[in-house]
Image (cartoon, helix red, strand yellow):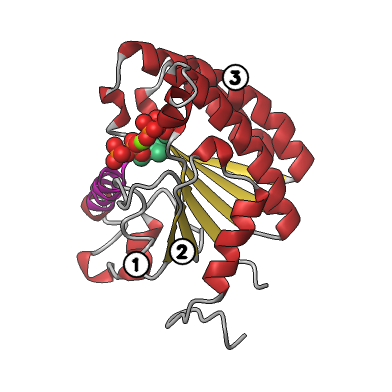
Amino acid sequence: MKVPNHIAIILDGNGRWAKARGMPRSYGHVKGCANLETICDDMKELGVKYLTVYAFSTENWKRSREEIEGLMRLFRNYLKKCIKISEKNKMKVKIIGDIRAFDEDIQRRIVELEEFSKDYDELHFYIALNYGSRDEIVRGMRRFGQDVKEGIRTPEELDERLFADYLDTAGAPDPDLMIRTSGELRLSNFLLWQLAYTEFYFTEVAWPDFNRAELIRAIETYNNRDRRYGGVKEE
Ligand code: IPE
Ligand code: IPE
Ligand code: MG
């Protein structure tokens, strides 16, 4: 089994998972968050080098105040805990998305975590928080425009490579495999540029139930695909 270099996951279905158990949505988020730790261990053990997860979108602010508050509490705890996880897995953590929307203390925890883990390279872990692909592209192009204005760049210089350098994922290879849990067949504004040639895998399994066996199933399916670019079979 060839393991993809970069796996991206849309962590979906926490709310439905909880509801099916007669529990509040927030309970699903707690379970989903715990599962993130487990899956990082699995990725590390399987030899995946890059993992990107979609944890909170630019659209998710529209949820109820109660749910948002619960999620913010969870982020606070997780960002702190993640320092230990990064140490254990020798993983470098980076948050993608516009973090300026979060409370100061959350932003500080993000900076601390990124700073603490910056020299690890066994697993590169990207967490998308207040992330939207369109927003990422617009923010990047604003910076490019500013660089042109300041004479650092010229419009003629802009090509696909340079464009990618202005995205939050600058420096990361494009994902080889994108997994979305819990049955929805859409991207929900996730990595629109980066997923241009990525293989997609959709499963009915909700995120809190997505485990190592499910991950291996996804990787096996990926192995059986005929990839036109970045081929699997011929290697
Ligand atoms: C994914 O689970 C986690 C976040 C978006 C924060 P959902 O909260 O979207 O769960 P469902 O899709 O409503 O079941
Ligand atoms: C996508 O899931 C975003 C995350 C998993 C963080 P959503 O549940 O928010 O997406 P939609 O609303 O079903 O498209
Ligand atoms: Mg959802």
Q: Pointer 3: residues within 10 angstroms few (<14), some, or many (20+)?
A: few
Q: Pointer 2: residues within 10 angstroms few (<14), some, or many (20+)?
A: many
Q: Where is residue 112 in the image (x, y as percent from the top left)?
A: 61, 28
Question: Which residues make up the magenta segment?
Answer: 132-145
Kindly identify which numbered label has been placed on residue 196: 1
Q: In this view, does 196 lie to the left or right of 203?
A: left
Which residue is labeled 3 in the image? Answer: 77
Which residue is labeled 2 in the image? Answer: 174
Whether 133 is among the magenta residues is: yes
Quadrant for residue 153, please give it.
bottom left
Q: Is mark 2 on a helix, strand or loop?
A: loop
**What residue occupies the far bottom of the structure in this picture?**
234
Q: Pointer 1: residues within 10 angstroms few (<14), some, or many (20+)?
A: few
- Reading the chain from its start, which is encountered first: label 1 or label 2? 2
Quadrant location of the N terminus in the rendered image: bottom right
Residue at 49 percent of width and 53 percent of height:
8
